[in-house]
Amino acid sequence: MKALIKWVNLHQCNLINTSDINTYHSYSDQSSSVLDLTFASKNMCNHIKNWYIDENANTEFDHEVILFTIVMKKVKLVENSLNASYNLQKVDWKDFDEHSQKTKDKMIVKMQRIKSLKAKVIYLTECIKNTVKLFVFKQRICTKSKLWWNNELIEMWKTLLSKKQIWKRCRNDDAWAEIVQMRNSYHDAIKLIKNQFWINFLNNVEEKEVFQIYKFIKSCLIEKLLLIQNLQKELKIEFNEKCKTFLKAMYSSSLKIQINEELLSNESIQWSRVIKEKIKHAINFSALRKAFESDDISFIIIQQAYKTILKIFNLMYSDLIENNYHSKIWCKGTKLILKKLNKLNYSISKTYRIITLLNCLDKVAEKIIVVQLSYTAEINDKLLNFDQMRDKKQRSAIDAVLNLVHDVQMTKSWENTLICLLLDVKEVFDHVALKQLIKILIKLKISVNLINWVKCFLQNRVIDLAFDDERQKSKKISTEISQDSSISLILFLIYIRYLFLKIRAKFENLQSLSYIDDMMLYVEKRNIDKNVKILKNAAKITFTWTENNAVQFNDSKSELIHFERHKITFNQMIILLNNMIIKSKTCIWWLKVWLNRKLNFKVHVQTKIATVTRTLHSLFRLMNSKWELNVKSEKQLYLTCITFISDYDVKIWWNNQKSYLVKFRKLQNAALRKILNAFQTSLIDAMQIKVKISLVKMQLNQKCKNYAIWIVELLKKHSIRKRTFISYSS
């Protein structure tokens, strides 16, 4: 007690407790006292109000719950952008549609009278919001959702509280015995209802509901950011200081570039008009679980509204795109700061992932433009190079890796050596210069309508930073394409297209591949020294072009590798313009595929086997629980979680290798035994027939056959199609 008095006097603290109010009630010896004390410093005492005991709070302890309010004038809290969402599962969509149907005619007449494009966007947004407020309610967010809670538990909880109040007044043995009996019955009922709910869920789960298991065990809240280190390595605590640190990290450099006036041209490519089918496709084929902005209008709500007021949507989007207008309301985005997993030091800004929340009505307009750009890229070779992957129809990361694998295998058949230089563009979407992008679009003879729309889209961009349940004031940014925007990828590919043309114009034997920000330059010849020399000169041209066009490379991710059949490894290196030395490696990781110098995929398959094994053991822990899943659900989890990992890039590495087949077969056999609870000596063929899972070899071969059939349907301009034999389709 003396130590406590000494500490209180040392820190000049004051007692906040209200006199004669007991904070401790011992149910064992039936005594009460003021055991729990609340102290505060002099500065904090002025902000503390409404100190009281919450007698209705139900706890398992003898201590009462103490509540008080801290009033701070300067602190203003807002809802978390991720949690402020509507409960769309309990919406009566019939009433929603009926209300939209009643107001449809009035909305069409008013939309036709409105001449301002900005006013049309605001009017449609407000109409949808008003309907949402009537029929859709916000969901309550808590740390763990108690789906098992029912009215019976509520009544038992109220009874327990009333018995506690009776005991506090009379303090006799009979009242105490009733409390003990009621408290035990209450906690036993919770355990029983929890168990019954979990058993019923696992036994009756169907299709996608099986993935709700992960949602049940995952917390709805995220941890608060503590300290953030700025460029001067100073730790920042306040919210505004953290925002400045993140903004400097995201927009650290804005390079001044010189625009060549020779790029100007008045000709244009034909640009198709916006038709109803494109608007319908953009709305109906949008991801329903995409995060949406603070207006809370999600794609589910837009799709439901489109069913009844599709004429209004068609009128608005046709007018906006044909008049080259992108609403300023849609130029605002919210950037959320989320922690990356398994990082050692979370005081560094790079250990956080930045997600941009955009308006869903804006995303529909962007998707319409993307569809038209992708179509133009397919019919016109001038828009993008044939080796530029992503955001073009039927061009993925697997296609990019397969192009490289084909070229390496052809080089080996000619007994040559292929050397690759891998480059990674740094902060892709934050270094797109608007003026340079417009000049490139003009040179490509793109329609004036699209150029004006891109101008409107990239100008007047405004962002908010939202984290720690707070939101920063809107801040303007000069040039930035949001990473979460659907049009960002294809605009960036157009932005860097002339780099590859410039390199190939000087080096005929040099080839290039790119997948968004991952670029690869490679050359094949028998003389290794000549290969290295060509790559050095190509790297100089590449870095010179990037400096003049506000693009930067991440030097730490630059790699060099020789693909050859010799046992001797080559130790050549390349020195970049910034004196960065890139040494040759024996194995690289490109587009989530491990490639070694002999291209036998040994490292890649070993890594894949380890990943599949970890995932399989995680499923085993779920299957070993007291209440097991049914066979149908366990099979669905296996096909979704295990076969997806094992079969994802099988087209690249599978060539009937027996050693790889044995490893995958062992994993599948273990899964079959666990699903059916079979013995170790059970027949594998019988279990496969019971569960209806095909052989591993059949699965892998079928994936490769499907891809071969898919190649036949590709256009002849496709990079994969160009690398096949002319007689392949026949």
Image: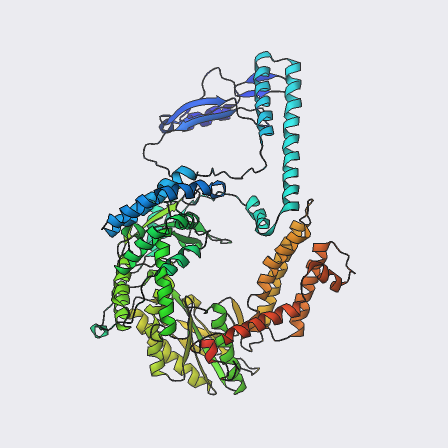
Question: Where 545 sits versus 645, above or below?
Answer: below
According to the image, what is the colour scheme of the structure?
rainbow
Residue 555 in the image: state x and y as whole percent.
Answer: 40, 67
Between 74 and 676, the residue placed more toward the observer is 676
Q: How many numbered markers are drawn? A: 0
Residue 390 visible from this viewpoint: yes
Horizontal side, residue 199 vs residue 461: left or right: right
On the image, which quarter does residue 225 sit in? Answer: top left
Between 251 and 309, the residue placed more toward the observer is 309
Residue extending furthest toward the right? 681
Residue 408 in the image: state x and y as whole percent.
Answer: 51, 80
Q: Residue at x 26, y 50 (%)?
A: 112
Between 644 and 466, the residue placed more toward the observer is 644
Residue 726 in the image: state x and y as whole percent.
Answer: 49, 84
On the image, which quarter does residue 516 sit in? Answer: bottom left
Question: Where 30 sits versus 376, above or below?
Answer: above
Question: Where 421 sits versus 640, above or below?
Answer: below
Residue 471 visible from this viewpoint: no
Question: Where 294 sits versus 700, above or below?
Answer: above
Residue 321 in the image: state x and y as whole percent.
Answer: 29, 59
Q: Residue at x 46, y 87 (%)?
A: 527
On the image, which quarter does residue 534 sit in? Answer: bottom left
Horizontal side, residue 262 vs residue 570: left or right: left
